[in-house]
Amino acid sequence: MTRSEKIGLGYRIFLGVFTFALGVLLVVGACELFFSEGGFPYEEVQARLKLLLAPFLLWAVAVAAGFVLADLFPARIQKRKRGAFSVYRRLISRLPAKAEGENARLLIRLRNGERLLWGIRAFCAAFCLLAAGMGIAYLCDPSHFGSAAGAADDAIALLQNVFPWVAAAFVLLCGAAAFESVYAKKTLPSVKRLLAAERGDELSRLARVRAAAEGAIGSRWTLLALRLAAGAVGVILLVVGIVEWDGVRAVLQKAIMICTQCIGLG
């Protein structure tokens, strides 16, 4: 680890601990006011914020110093290695529309796996929408708040009715992400094998077409002579077109007529 990396790591640890401590102080102050009998009086809130003003200013200075340290001690940029899932997503889009023999069965299996992944994503999206709807429905019902039991009981009831939905959605998303990662690692070799086979078949087909063309025309020297002759004819016709001014002027006039009359430019 270089000197710049050590300084950067030390700064990040210091800023993280400082941010966590400042957040704890803010939460403790808010909880003390929340559970006090007086509620949130303006004078008490102002007094507690004044106590946090100095630490907050120091935290802001530390954040600003981080930008300066980033320029003075730049970190070494390392090339990020692609994960299995990102490589899988990049290669799965290159699968051929159809295949033959053993590759056809492998292609069908990969397509079915893609449908399974999309089904899992759709289920996760539907469950997250349901969880969000249940939470919003509870929060929008005024009867759940302002009860005689007090704000603490209302908060506990809120956690009991909303948190399970949020936790279930979080666990479901984490499980789906883990399943996709494991599936990508297990399926990636099959995807690469299928693409390699298809690329080999394509190269062999191109080689056969080229061999047939060379066989129909003759040797490669004959093919090279034909190419040179075609290039020479093209150059000659280009020079003749430039020298023949009347032909160039006629083409230019037609282009002007098209632009000004047909398209409407000018």
Image (cartoon, rainbow, N blue to C red):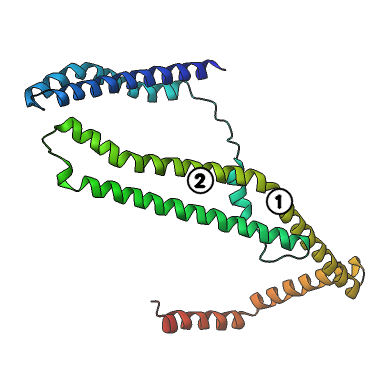
Give the quarter of the image for residue 12. Answer: top left
The residue pinned by badge 2 equals 176
Residue 178, x across and y down, in percent: 54, 41
Which residue has dot 1 on it? 190
Residue 100 occupies quadrant: bottom right
Q: CA distance from mark 2 to mark 1?
A: 21 Å
Upstream in sequence: badge 2 or badge 1: 2
Identify the element where label 1 is drawn. Answer: helix
From the viewer's side, name the closer residue of 170 and 189. Answer: 170
Residue 32 x/y as whole percent: 18, 21
Query: Does residue 38 appear left or right of residue 159 in this picture?
Result: left
In the rendered image, the vertical position of residue 153 relative to residue 60, given as above or below = below
Q: Which residue of the protein is positioned furthest toward the front in this rendering?
A: 149
> Which residue appears at 68% of the width and 74% of the height?
238
In the rendered image, is residue 93 in sight?
no
Say if 83 sits above or below 2 in the image: below
Which residue is drawn at the image coordinates 71% and 58% (left, top)?
106
